[in-house]
Image (cartoon, helix red, strand yellow):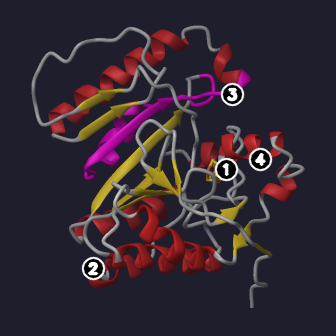
Amino acid sequence: MKKSLPKIYRKTLLYKSGVEYADYSLNHVLGCSHGCRYPCYAMMMKKRCGIIRDYQEWIKPKVVANALELLDKEIPKYKHKIKFVHLCFSTDPFMFGQPEVEGLTLKILARLKKDDIRCVVLTKGVYPKDLLDKEKYGINNEYGITLVSLSEKFKSKFEPFSAPLLERIESLETLHKAGLKTWISMEPYPTPNLAEQNLNDLLTRVSFVDKIIFGKFNYNTHSSQFKNSKEFYDDCAGKVVAFCQEKGLECHIKFGTRTRRKCLEKKSKTQEIFSELKPSPFIYA
Ligand code: SF4
C-alpha cells in the first residue's frame, strides 16, 4: 500500500489570482511529483521564497491537511465575488500516481459545487471517471490538460513523471463525450530546437475541445537561443487562431507570445483574447 503523503497546515486557501485568464485560485498541495523540467515556474518561486530547498523536495508533495476546513470558512466570505476557481497554478490537482491528491481534489470540487462555484481545472495527470457524476461535481466546470507535444520522448525529458500523453488525452475525451467542457493549455510550446514537430498534428488531435490556450516557452536557455523565436511564435499563434476560427473554438494567446499583433480579419465564434495590458506570471500547471 502506498505510504500517505506528508501533511502541512495553511492559514488560508482561496486567493485572487494575478494570472491573465484566471479569477480565484487555490493550491491544496505543496510541491508536485510531475517534476517538470521546462523549468517549473511554481518550483522556481517556492525556491526563491525559501519554502523548498530543491527539486528533490519539490517532487515529494505535501498535502494541505486542513484544506476542506479552510474552504468551509472561506467560501461564505468570497462566494459572491468568485466567478470561478482555478485548480491549480502551483501544483497539479490530478498528480499522476498520487491517489491521495486525487481524492482531496475530488472532495474540494464537490465542496465548491455545493455552493455552485464553477471550477477550471488543469492537469498533466489523468482525469478520473468520478467526474462524470454530474450531481456531485456539476456540469459547469472546465477540465483542461497541458499538452505541448505528442512525443513521449519530449514528455519524458520535460515532464518526466506526468501521465502518459495518450492516457491524458483519452481521459479528457471521456469528459468531453459526457458533455463536459474541456480545454487545452498548449504552454510552454517548444521551439524547434527543443522539439521538431508539426503544430497542426497536435491541434488536430485535440480538436474535440472547447478552448485552446497557447503560450511560448519561458525561462529556458535553449529555447531562448533559438534565433527565430519571434517569427516562430508569431507563426504558431497565427496557426492556432486560424485553427480555432475554423473549428469554432475559443482561443487565448498568452501575453508575450505574439510580438506582431495581427488583427482578426473574420468575425466568427472564435474569440481571441489578447491580454496585452496586464502581463502575468507564466505558470505551467
Ligand atoms: S509545471 Fe505544473 S505539473 Fe509540472 S511540476 Fe510544475 S506544477 Fe507540476
Q: Quadrant of residue 176?
A: bottom left
Q: What is the spatial separation of the Cα atoms under label 4 and label 2, in whole angstroms?
A: 35 Å
Q: What is the spatial separation of the Cα atoms under label 2 and label 1, in whole angstroms?
A: 34 Å
**Depth-wise, is mark 2 or mark 1 nearer the camera?**
2
Label 1 residue SS: helix
Please give left or right for residue 42 compared with residue 152 in the image: right
The answer to if 122 sits in the magenta stretch is no
- Crowd rating for badge 1 (residues with CA inside 10 Å; few <14, some 14–19, many 20+): some
- Inspect the image, locate mark 4, and give the three-letter code of the amino acid beneath it: Lys
**Depth-wise, is mark 4 or mark 1 nearer the camera?**
4
Q: Position of residue 234 (x, y in %)?
A: 41, 15
Q: Quadrant of residue 269?
A: top left
Q: Is mark 3 within 8 Å of ligand 1?
A: no
Please give the label number shown on residue 219: 3
- Seen from this angle, which residue lies furthest front? 77
The residue drawn where x is 44% and y is 11% is 259
Say which label, 3 or 2, has the lower sequence index: 2
Q: Which residue is mark 2?
A: 134
Q: What is the spatial separation of the Cα atoms under label 4 and label 1, in whole angstroms?
A: 23 Å
Q: Quadrant of residue 20?
A: top left
Please give the label number shown on residue 46: 4
Q: Which residue is mark 1?
A: 156
Pick the residue in front: 59 or 80: 80
- Inspect the image, locate mark 1, and give the three-letter code of the amino acid beneath it: Ser
Pick the residue in front: 65 or 70: 70
Q: Is residue 196 visible?
A: yes
The answer to whether marks 4 and 2 mark residues whose Cβ atoms lie closer than 8 Å is no
